[in-house]
Amino acid sequence: MSIRRWDPFDELTSLRESMERLFDDFFTRRPAGRPLAPAMWEPAVEVFETEGEVVFRAEMPGIDPQSVDVTVSEDSLTLKAEARAEAEQKGRNYYRRELRYGAFQRSVALPTSVQTDQAKAAFKNGILEVRIPKAERAKAKTVRVEVE
């Protein structure tokens, strides 16, 4: 067993990180003005880039593609939509109801500058995919070095 010098600030760092996580969970997952409401939901997303474009994918099963609003700026993508709940029917005794319904808005920072006017979106099998070409200045350029 090795001896390690005790640093009281290590414990303060851990406490601060725990408090930040607590406040993030409490304030970012709840609707404004309703602190005791159930947590809002957001679709799972993935963002990646290829050589010439940035690709954004969101998992949105059961959402009408016509109700989806995608806004692309030079450095971020914002997704707005609403999952509509079916009305509860009399005669049903729910034992568990975990499907999430309601409006959501999710903004994601893009890793590089993009050409916003050339974004293309497709919706297939509950997955929204947005492909955005990179801006010219963001594309890597190869320069050949000549030796004299």
Image (tube, helix red, strand yellow):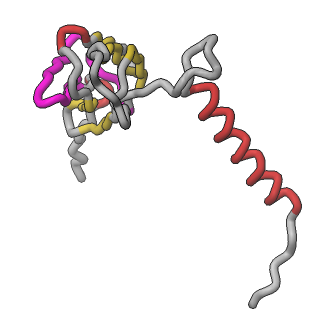
On screen, 126 above or below 84? below
Q: Check the picture and name the quadrant holding the N terminus.
A: bottom right
On screen, 51 above or below 85? below
Which range is magenta? 111-133
Query: In the image shown, does 109 or 78 lie closer to the viewer?
Result: 78
User: Is residue 113 highlighted in magenta?
Assistant: yes
> What is the total number of numbered labels drawn onto the structure image?
0
Q: Is residue 72 left or right of residue 32?
A: left
Q: Quadrant of residue 14?
A: bottom right
Q: Quadrant of residue 28?
A: top right
Residue drawn at 87 percent across, 71 percent down: 6
Residue 84 visible (yes or no): no
Q: Position of residue 33 (x, y in %)?
A: 63, 11
Residue 146 visible (yes or no): yes
On screen, 64 above or below 28? above
Residue drawn at 23 percent across, 41 percent down: 142
Q: Quadrant of residue 5?
A: bottom right
Which residue lies most toward the front here? 91
Which residue lies most toward the bottom here? 1
Q: Is residue 9 left or right of residue 144?
A: right
Query: In the image shown, does 139 or 98 lie closer to the viewer?
Result: 98
Query: In the image shown, does 51 or 85 lie closer to the viewer?
Result: 85
Residue drawn at 42 percent across, 21 percent down: 107
Residue drawn at 29 percent across, 10 percent down: 69
Which residue lies most toward the left here? 124
Q: Position of residue 8 (x, y in %)?
A: 88, 61
Q: Position of residue 50 (x, y in %)?
A: 22, 39
